[in-house]
Amino acid sequence: MFHDSLRLFGIPSHSISPLHPVVQSGARNMAASMRLNIAKGVTCLLNVARFAPSCLVIPVRTKKRLRLPPRSYDSLEQQQKQLKAAGMMIPEEKMSQYITITCTSGIFDPYIPAEGDARMSMLSKEGLLQRTEKLRQTAKSYTAIRKIRESDPDFRIKTFGGKAQEIFIEAHNNLTNFNEEKLHTLVTEHCYPILAIYDQFGRLMYGSEQIPKDVLEYVVFERHLLHRTGQWRLHDKIVPSWAPPKDPLIKTVMIPGPTLTPSEA
């Protein structure tokens, strides 16, 4: 072992004479420490982390992720009870407006000639405007009739009045009988039914269920001209601006009476 350590320093072994045992033990310890240092140096040279960038070696703390617990929502009934207890009104659900391509969304030209007291004198400015508007609408009517006859040669104004009346009566009969299939062939999707109005005590406030009432209504019919098998259907009605106003609602109020004892009840 001593001869091997001397070879590391380049000293031939035959030129060294035998030493004292204490000197030999010190040389052995020195050789062992030298081999340990050489092994550590080789280990450091072979370490892959030595050639890696410094940013990969520095430890970095990861981000904290806070997970919130799920929120407990109140049911719809509980929300309504809370709103009623607080004296707040429950908001109504707004229905989205539907879109249909089977009919128009309204009336293109809602014109009705003035009748009765609504007619103005020709000497006034309003009377001249009425006559001018009537002439313009008359020209539009002739143009529209000519356009309708291009698609429907059998269309006649004299016979259309009776046919329109039959459609109007049959539509109301099917409405009362809840015949939806037949009703769709008589009215368009834009034609909304008008309901009777009752008060809080169940009394009818408008109209009558038994006595017929003479009602003047300006009804509009619609038809697809390019459709050969198309039919005239009830579409809408026009309320003229010069029409007299309707009667106001008769308000009914409940007057509380005196409190009765159990013997008087």
Image: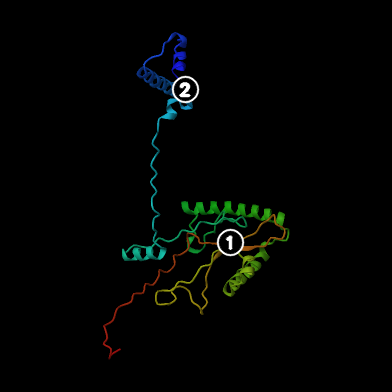
Against 178, residue 45 (above or below) is above
User: Residue 142: x, y in percent?
Assistant: 64, 54
Residue position marked by numbered label 2 in the rendering? 42
The disc labelled 2 sits on which kind of residue? Val
Instruction: Tell me what residue is drawn at x 34 percent, y 64 percent.
Output: 82
**Residue 53 shows up from this direction:** yes
Against 193, residue 23 (above or below) is above
> Helix, strand or loop at disc 2?
helix
Q: Earlier in the sequence, mark 1 or mark 2?
A: 2
> Helix, strand or loop at disc 1?
loop
* Quarter of the figure that contains the N terminus: top left
The disc labelled 1 sits on which kind of residue? Glu
Instruction: Tell me what residue is drawn at x 40 percent, y 20 percent.
Output: 28
108 horizontally vs 241: left or right: right
Q: Nearer the viewer, mark 1 or mark 2?
A: 2
User: Residue 230: x, y in percent?
Assistant: 69, 60
